[in-house]
Image (cartoon, rainbow, N blue to C red):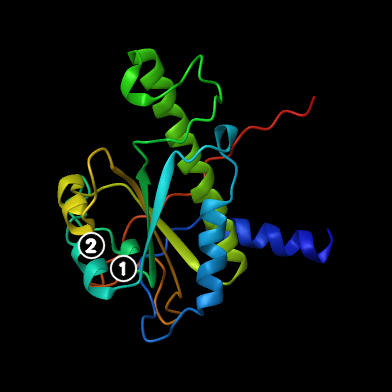
Amino acid sequence: MSEINTTIVKAIHRGQHCQRNWKLDEKMPSVDIETIITSATQCPSKQNLDFYSVIAIQDREIIESIYETTMTAKGRKNPQVLAHLLLIFVENPEVTQIDRNSEIRGKMTKHTSLTLSAMEEDLHQAIGVAAGFVNVTSSMLGYRTGCNKCFDTDTVKEILQLGEGERPILMMGVGIHNEDRGRREEHKEGFMIDAFKKVPIKVRHI
């Protein structure tokens, strides 16, 4: 395997793990942040439409407020959002339409449930692709990431002053990991968070 292939494979495997604590006394260079944001906004989407917007947060007070809205079914908060950079992927209620597949999709507010279902599917696929690009890009730059979708939507909308139809879908923390702590150790409270081994994905070569 070539050196570049080895580097990419290692980055992919690192990106598989959710980071739960951060070395916040160090700063991420602005050039790295811009590269990561580029990966979130310039990745492919269905007909390259703008199904989502991205809010890039570095303000600690806002990040801490959003952390307080997170809650899992196990009754704990999600410290992956406490990273140096918190990306919020937000549904775009006014997806740009330039006669792209309009026979099926059109404007979200004027079509049937079938159309809305197709738009919803495209939205989540687009955000999934973007999150994957952010994950690998961040890992190759030496950072760690963690996604979160367990949060109080209404409170987050209020914190971010989002408009009608702007629904936060996914949060993604990106930052510098604390080498003195295991990645599963909760940032604030110090308890260990469960981890799960990757279930093998079947590949068929034809």
Badge 1, how many Cα within 10 Å: few under 14, some, many 20+? Answer: many
Contact between marks 2 and 1 (CB within 8 A): the answer is yes
The N terminus: image quadrant: bottom right
Where is residue 190? Give x, y as percent.
Answer: 26, 72
Q: Residue at x 23, y 46 (%)?
A: 163
One can see residue 71 in this view: no
Which residue position holds label 1?
82
The C terminus: image quadrant: top right
Write down the quadrant of residue 92 in the picture. Answer: top left
User: How many badges with numbers are in the image?
Assistant: 2
Where is residue 105? Give x, y as percent.
Answer: 46, 20
Q: Which numbered marker is on residue 17?
A: none
The residue sitting at the bottom extreme is 25
Task: Give the answer, above or below, for where 140 lies relative to 52.
Answer: below
Task: Give the answer, above or below, for where 52 lies relative to 118.
Answer: below
Q: Residue at x 22, y 73 (%)?
A: 61
Disc nearer the start of the sequence (2/1) = 2
Where is residue 31? Give x, y as percent.
Answer: 56, 75
Where is residue 160? Give x, y as percent.
Answer: 23, 57
Write down the quadrant of residue 84 in the picture. Answer: bottom left
Badge 2, how many Cα within 10 Å: few under 14, some, many 20+? Answer: some
Amino acid marked by disc 2: Tyr
Amino acid marked by disc 1: Leu
One can see residue 127 in this view: yes
Q: CA distance from mark 2 to mark 1?
A: 7 Å
Residue placed most toward the observer, 67 or 127 = 127
Left/right placement of residue 129 relative to residue 6 reads: left
Q: Residue at x 44, y 74 (%)?
A: 177
Q: Which numbered marker is on residue 67?
A: 2
Q: Residue at x 48, y 41 (%)?
A: 50
Task: Give the answer, above or below, for where 26 lies relative to 149.
Answer: below
